[in-house]
Image (spheres, grey):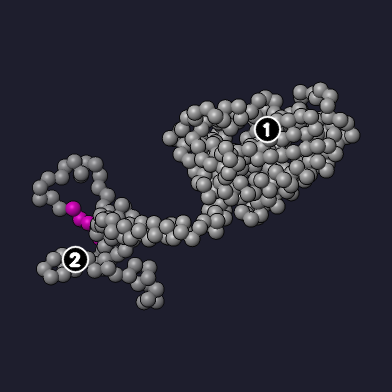
Amino acid sequence: MTRLENGPAQGPLSAAATGPARSGRRGAPRTYDFRRPTKLSREHVRVLQIAQESFARQATTVLTTMLRTGARLELLSIEQHSYDDYVATLSNPWFMATFTIEPLAGKGLLAYPLDIAMASVDHMLGGSGAASQPDRPMTVMETTITNHLLTRLLQEFTTSFEHIVELQPELSEVEYNPQLAQAAAGSDTVMVATFAIGIGSRSGEATLVLPFSSFAPALNNAASPHLSESAQAKRRRAFEALTERLTQVPVEVGVRFAPLEVSSEDLLSLAVGDVLLLRHPQDAPLEVTTNDVTFAYAIASNHRRRLAAAIVPTPLAAQKDTA
């Protein structure tokens, strides 16, 4: 896994190899899993940082307005995890809301401590939120009230990510057991943005989880304009060099007749001098193949005393020309 977090001078989020850990262990050495190499580039992180910080600012306004109390949401880090490793960092119970990310495939997940979720309901009902909160799933009424808040937060999420991709998220369900919140397959790579959340006198960590595979194309497109001219020129040169070298890679090519099927008995009884009937039509071209893939057709020929194969149109194209 890869952890990307703020440097000591509050600079851009930087890449570092890590394992799943809570905020108290950010200074400790991290284990790098070579079976799950880093997929988030620095360009991806810059684009995500802009979107996530915008979401944090807008969400802070929404929370303060709807809860009528002091609230804050501040981006701490952007991480890459497998979904199983992310879930392992959560306590049970934990408040988790999954949502679709149409038109992209997969689901997103917004999670934060259950006591903060319960205190939010208390605030929206006119309470102070300071009382001890119940450690249980929400009732139907509490869920309805919370869904209204989540819908507003998803609207801000849509606005914050519109420079990356236009989304139409919809709230799916709320879960309290991390093992039951199936927002992704266990081995899927997810992008985890960790926020410091504060509601009144309560504070904790919130996470916004998004599937990497669904966002990868959009992140690549959004990251390109943020590259300097020298970086873009360097990428172009690398692409041209790679393309040139690929055109020089030797490839084994074969010209073959139509395959022949024989019984095992006939195959085992073959001896020198036996004749196999190829059953290849005399007017049918030969197949030109590489790695068992037919990519052209040819007829037997010669070139300066050497056997050769002259490329001819495919049988289908020849039929169209004569039709």
Residue placed at 18% from the left, 53% from the top?
276
Query: Which percent across, then down, holds residue 3?
Result: 54, 36
Residue placed at 39% from the left, 76% from the top?
323
Q: Earlier in the sequence, mark 1 or mark 2?
A: 1
Q: Is residue 229 left or right of residue 285?
A: right
Mark drawn on residue 205: 1
**Count of labels in the image:** 2
Q: Identify residue for label 2.
A: 308
Discs 1/2, front: 1
Q: CA distance from mark 1 to mark 2?
A: 71 Å
Decide whether residue 14 is among the magenta residues: no
Q: Nearer the viewer, residue 75 or 132?
A: 75
Amino acid type at circle 1 is Glu
Q: Check disc 2 and report its element: helix, strand or loop.
A: strand
Q: Is residue 103 left or right of residue 120?
A: left
Q: Nearer the viewer, residue 132 or 42?
A: 42
Q: Check disc 1 and report its element: helix, strand or loop.
A: strand
The extreme front residue here reads: 9
Q: Nearer the viewer, residue 228 or 279?
A: 228
Query: Is residue 98 visible to us here?
Result: no
Q: Which residues are magenta?
A: 276-280
Query: Which percent across, then down, holds residue 20?
Result: 55, 30
Q: Is residue 254 above or below residue 269?
A: below
Discs 1, 2 touching: Cβ within 8 Å: no
Query: Which percent across, then down, holds residue 145?
Result: 83, 38
Residue placed at 58% from the left, 50% from the top?
47
Q: Is residue 253 above or below residue 283?
A: above
Query: Which percent across, then down, holds residue 25?
Result: 57, 27
Main SS class of the magenta portion in the image: loop
